Amino acid sequence: MNKKSLLIRWLSVLMVSLLFALFVGCSSKEEPSVPGETPPAEEGEEEEETPEETPGEENPSEENTLSAEELKELFGSGKDMAEIYYEMNVTGMGSENTISRMYMKGSKMRAESEVMGQTFVMIHGEDALYILDDSSKTAMKMPLGENAEGEQETFTMDDFTSDVDETDMTYVGKETLNGVSCHVVESTKLEEGYHVKMWLHEEYGFPMKMESHNKDGSEAFVMEVTDFKVGDLSDALFEVPEGYEIVDMGNLIPSVP
């Protein structure tokens, strides 16, 4: 797997949402339980030691491991998700903590990002990109880019796993993350410059958490999905709301001969 390519694909949705912000950056978390007080031991009695809890991650064994073929199937299972919503936290990369919410349905995408206390909304439609400004009720419309074949570029779920080489990953074990059972894998070719560790949704193969850093430990960042749902997304999420004035930026940018 090309580490930089995977990182770019994983970050592409987030970076687009942060760029438009700069143009103007599982299930729900459970509350930690508060342990009760342990009554003092009676005089003459030895206080019973409480065993430490074992971490959720398990070491791989013959019963708890994935072959290269099973890893390939796990990475590919995300392609079956036609509709998906998730919320993620991103820390590191020299920036403040960023919260983003992503909605994807086919080739359409909606991104909501909280940056510096403000929420920004971007809609990636089938024909154009829209940046919404709720305060002024305006939507900036920008044309989509084109690929080498002259076709408009759209984002699909395949972009998450198309560059994955399962032979470049080592299976670590299973771990429950925010109530979701995950397979944990990590990269093995550090000479390429990046170390990547991922927590993959046991059913969908979707990265629920990703940690990455350079060989020297710099440029570290963590991305963690805190809410995850598949299916049942309204088409209205990917449309400009009524009452918004659409400003076509394509008409304002002079064409290059």
Image (cartoon, rainbow, N blue to C red):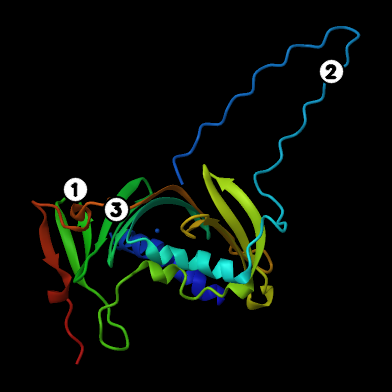
Closer to the observer: label 2 or label 1? 2
Cα separation, mark 2 vs mark 1, equals 62 Å
Q: Earlier in the sequence, mark 2 or mark 3?
A: 2
Kind of residue sitting beneath label 2: Glu
Closer to the observer: label 1 or label 3? 3
Per the image, label 2 sits on a secondary structure element best described as loop
Proximity of marks 1 and 3: CB atoms separated by less than 8 Å: no
Quadrant showing the C terminus: bottom left
Q: To which residue does mark 2 refer?
A: 47
Q: To which residue does mark 1 refer?
A: 135
Per the image, label 1 sits on a secondary structure element best described as loop
Proximity of marks 2 and 1: CB atoms separated by less than 8 Å: no
The label on residue 120 is 3
The image quadrant that residue 131 belongs to is bottom left
Q: Residue reaching furthest front?
A: 63
**Could you tell me which residue is drawn at 40 percent across and 58 percent down?**
25
Image location of residue 53, percent across then percent down = 71, 35
Closer to the observer: label 2 or label 3? 2
